[in-house]
Amino acid sequence: MSAVKPRSLMLGKIIGVGSVGLAQLSLWAVMALVLINFREPILGVFGISGAGAFGLPPLGIADLLVILAYFLLGFFLYSSVYAAIGAMVSSEQEATQLQMPVILLLVVPVMCVQIVANDPRGGISSALTQFPFSSPVLMPMRYLLDGASAAEVALSMGILVLTIAGCVLAAAKIYRLGILLTGKRPNLKTIWRWLRY
């Protein structure tokens, strides 16, 4: 561990956990497709009629790529923020206290889903889908509702990638200085000094 750079170590942890999450999501998607396509025989085993007009909405390759890209970028964004939090604390109780602001960053976009669904071309929808902490949740929906152009999606992804790079660098600095050098829990003043170091 002493020969590995903190940035590489932090990025490796994020990629490793992200790969497991992507494998789990892929398994769920395959199971959902099997259950949807073979629902009548499966429900027939339980004596339930599976007849009905249930199916998936048609999605093109571009739609699936946008959804997958935002899932991955959103995962890397939030996991890098959580990695920084994990590097700052030494107990689960401390981590729980620091997670609240991040959870709020996840809850606010979910609360704004109706705003984007009602007016995908509106100014508020555009602003929400360019903000990096809400774009992973809201931009795929806005894109599928024909509310975002390809240029807006590209701009949103660019902002998101830059934010991820900044968060990974910040998490690596916090990890290197907080865990590897001092080993004590920092306050906000100390964290700010580490980030400027």
Image (cartoon, helix red, strand yellow):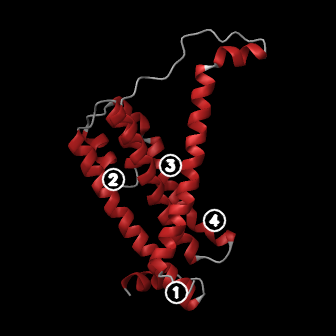
| Numbered badge on residue 131 | 2
Identify which amino acid the numbered label 3 is placed on.
Answer: Val
Residue closer to the observer: 161 or 35 = 35
Residue 188 in sight here: no
Residue 24 in sight here: yes
Q: Which residue is mark 3?
A: 107
Please identify, in this view, whether the residue under mark 1 or under mark 3 is nearer the observer: 1
Tell me if label 1 and label 3 are in contact, CB under 8 Å.
no
Q: Which residue is mark 4?
A: 96
Q: Which residue is mark 1?
A: 3
Indicate which disc, 4 or 3, sits on the residue closer to the N terminus.
Answer: 4
Please identify, in this view, whether the residue under mark 2 or under mark 1 is nearer the observer: 1
Indicate which disc, 1 or 3, sits on the residue closer to the N terminus.
Answer: 1
Identify which amino acid the numbered label 2 is placed on.
Answer: Phe
Indicate which disc, 2 or 4, sits on the residue closer to the N terminus.
Answer: 4
Give the CA distance from mark 1 to mark 3. 39 Å
Residue plotted at (56% across, 90% down): 182
Residue closer to the observer: 6 or 196 = 6
Indicate which disc, 2 or 1, sits on the residue closer to the N terminus.
Answer: 1
Question: How far across and down, in percent of the image, does residue 106 sit?
Answer: 49, 51
Question: How far across and down, in percent of the image, does residue 38 sit?
Answer: 63, 19
